[in-house]
Amino acid sequence: MAKVKEFLELCGYTDEEEIRRTIPRLEESMRRAKMPPEDVEHAIESLHKCYRSDLELESVRKMLGVWLKKWMALMHARDEYKKVVYHFHPGQPRAMLMLNLVSDDIFCDFADMLFYTMAGRVFNNNNRYLEMGEKAGLPPARAHCGASLIGLAIQAEDLLQPPDLIVNSVYQCDQQHKIAEMIAELWGVPQVKADTVADEPWGLFPDISDRAVKYWGSTWEAELIKKTEEVLGIEIPDEAIQKSRHIYARIWRLLDEIHHVIAEAERRPVNFGSFFIFDFAVLEPDRIIVNEGIPILELHLKELKERVERGYGVLPKGAPRIVLKCEMGGDMTCAPLPEDVGLNVVIPINATWLAEFEKHPVIDYARFKGASPTEKVAAAFLRKGYIRACDHHVWRVRELVRETNADGLIFDPVYQCRAFAGLPVMVKQTVEKDLGVPTMYLEVGAFDARDHNYDTMKTKMETFAELLKARKAMAEETK
């Protein structure tokens, strides 16, 4: 009991009565997830290793609590809601937000990624579920994405009860789409999917294709709106779509402000390990994120600014500035690696697609002013540039390195990831040729840390860090 209370306090719980009510709910959630009680003790240890001094921030503790609440809601969804909808990665966050706004009787959240966030980013026991997925039919040594393994484990091991509807998307990852499709068949439940066209000419971005906007918008209208309405017996009015756009934009703007505070600070005010729980709040906007997460993002922005004003930093002044594309794999205790080798990550995780980071607007989409609500959503999504083609990724990464005046780029190719595995060579060649900025590949596992651990990655990152430090020293001497 004492350990569970300590764990909840690390997750931002302060009211004794709320803690008393939450303990049996947490214990039942863990039982359904086949987590032994001792996982709480392991979670406490992992939280301290990953978040370090950031646990002093109320916003960090509370955001951990938001993810815990989201996960417990997932584990109890069939008991507490009339209709249950599971999204599977990459899903469609705006559609999720729409359903959360339409009715409080509907549960709609990611199944695989929410489960990963709790298992991988709070309890740090992700390997158990990866092995369940392999046992269920996705064999090891075949470079299966960890999200696919977890998704299959959810169904095969009865970790969750069947939903009323599954939402999946083929626009970024074909494998995860097929896994979700298979799970829908195994559960015997209907599914809808978001589709798109990807045959755009190289060099089109930062412009976006009218054809893609219209096609994707019509797909959302037919699948994510009309078919969802039919399956669930509900109506999704245009007002809900518009409201979801405005709320989503507010979350993006807050995250963008947070990114700028970090990028512009003389000393990095927060550890790299903290950013997953904030950045991914944008990708999974359920009612808990709307009601509790948005105020926490505002609090986090305030606390970061206060740290900057005090001159607080997790690294000394002058540490090499790097852009790090993707993250550090599935073991949360690997997340502080950049700080441990003396590198200042000025852009956290996937800011190339998590925010409008460029200082100057690059896409004029006023031409979509008269478009349908779903086409406007499609246009806003496409301008992020991360879900389309290789040149989009290359363009965004190059611009981020330029805008942040980075000393180096670390590109994590996450070798099991269908979307990112083929990009590193083009990114490295472009950034080094156009900007003269050193770039390193750092192979990591996509939500799977079994083959890439702290020690193996640290050796490579230390070498790159020494290179960047030497370059900075030489540049100072030649001024």
Image (cartoon, rainbow, N blue to C red):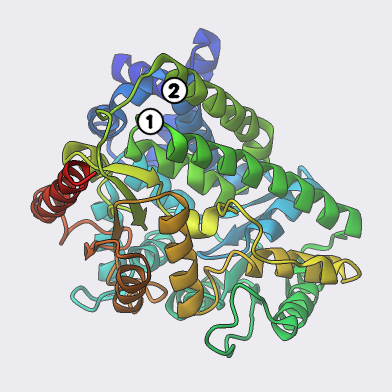
Task: Kindly identify which numbered label has been placed on residue 88.
Answer: none
Q: Residues within 10 Å of mark 1 (few under 14, many from 20)?
A: some
Task: Kindly identify which numbered label has been placed on residue 266.
Answer: 1
Front in this rendered view, residue 356 or 474? 474
Q: Residue furthest front?
A: 479
Q: How crowded is mark 2: few (under 14 residues within 10 Å), some or many (20 or more)?
A: some
Quarter holding the C terminus is: top left
Front in this rendered view, residue 318 or 169? 318
Q: Is residue 72 visible?
A: no
Would you place residue 60 above or below residue 439 in this image? Answer: above
Residue 452 image-quadrant placement:
bottom left
Front in this rendered view, residue 373 or 236? 373
Residue 221 image-quadrant placement:
bottom right
Query: How far across and down, in percent of the image, does residue 432 sit?
Result: 30, 69
Q: Mark 2 points at which residue?
A: 308
Q: What residue type is labelled 2?
A: Val
What residue sits 76% from the left and 42% below the top? Answer: 104
What residue sits 55% from the left and 28% below the top? Answer: 301
Mark 2 touching mark 1, by CB under 8 A? yes
Query: How far across and down, in percent of the image, does residue 329 sit?
Result: 28, 55
Would you place residue 174 above or below residue 6 in this image? Answer: below
Task: Give the mark toward the camera: 2 or 1.
Answer: 1
Query: How far across and down, in percent of the image, does residue 162 sit?
Result: 56, 61
Q: Can residue 406 be seen in this view?
A: yes
Q: Which amino acid does label 1 sit on?
A: Glu
Q: Residue furthest top?
A: 16
Q: What element carries label 1?
A: loop
Quarter holding the N terminus is: top left
Q: In the rendered structure, which disc, 2 or 1, sits on the residue that comes first in sequence?
A: 1
What residue sits 36% from the left and 74% below the top? Answer: 430
